[in-house]
Image (tube, grey):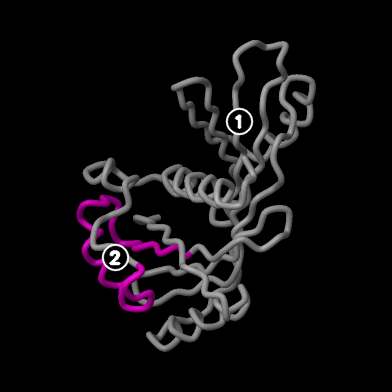
Amino acid sequence: MGVTVLQQYPMTENKTGPQTIEFLTKRVVALGAVQTGQFLVDCETYVSVPQLGAQRTLHVLHNSEQPASAFAILESGNKVVPLIADGLFDLLMYKMSSVYTNKMQKMESKGPRFEIGDFCVKLGSVTINQNFKGVLVEVEYRPCVVPGSAWELMREFLQGFLGSTVSNQAPQYLQNRMNDIYQPLDTIQQYLEHFGQYRKATGVI
């Protein structure tokens, strides 16, 4: 696993979600990319019952790139506690239904997965409870695990097929971790951040 950047692609009024994915697919294929299947990242959010006092929010996510893992991010006040567990964690959540209740509708980003040289590109249709909300592009540069060393090359690649929608500045999340070793949990944190933005934009809080 290398360094990953997520980029929201702006929707235009004259294009549907599938049309936008098709448009971006043509651009990626024109660069020489080859489709290598599909991908899926999903998220369910739970909140603690009032009897526990201060509210805790628990996000449970899955990434098809790590099929044996479940990712959990617990938010309690100003504290954020990440956890990586195996698939049995989902069964544990069913057992904890008296403590945590499912608050929000399920969010997903899914679509075609491409490989081109050292890059992996994923074009995701973002849905809330199967209702389309936008397009999220994931680009991974696999040979490098330090964001500060990979960003300039990734920015050039992203701008090559997404155009001016890509900022010259690295996303804030990567700016905070430029000299760190990139981990799968960092990708999950980025997805959770973008999912939150889609929720706010559509009034689903």
**For this view, does 24 lie left or right of residue 204?**
left
Q: Is 110 within the magenta?
A: no
Marker disc for residue 154: 2
Q: Is 158 within the magenta?
A: yes
Label 1: few (<14), some or many (≥20) within 10 Å? many
Q: Nearer the viewer, residue 57 or 87?
A: 57
Q: Position of residue 27 (x, y in %)?
A: 43, 84
In terms of sequence position, does the residue under pointer 2 or pointer 1 come before the other? 1
**For this view, does 145 lie left or right of residue 103?**
left
Q: In percent of the image, x 79 and y 20: which residue is there?
A: 98
Q: Amino acid at mark 2?
A: Met
- What span is in magenta? 137-165
Determine whether label 2 and label 1 are within 8 Å by CB: no
Which quadrant would the C terminus be assigned to in this image?
Answer: top right
Q: Which residue is mark 1?
A: 58
Which quadrant would the N terminus be assigned to in this image?
Answer: bottom left
Q: Position of residue 171 (x, y in %)?
A: 32, 52
| Secondary element at tag 2 | helix
Quarter-wise, where is residue 78 in the image? top left
Q: In percent of the image, x 46 and y 27: which residue is there?
A: 80
Q: Main secondary structure of the magenta part?
A: helix
| Secondary element at tag 1 | strand
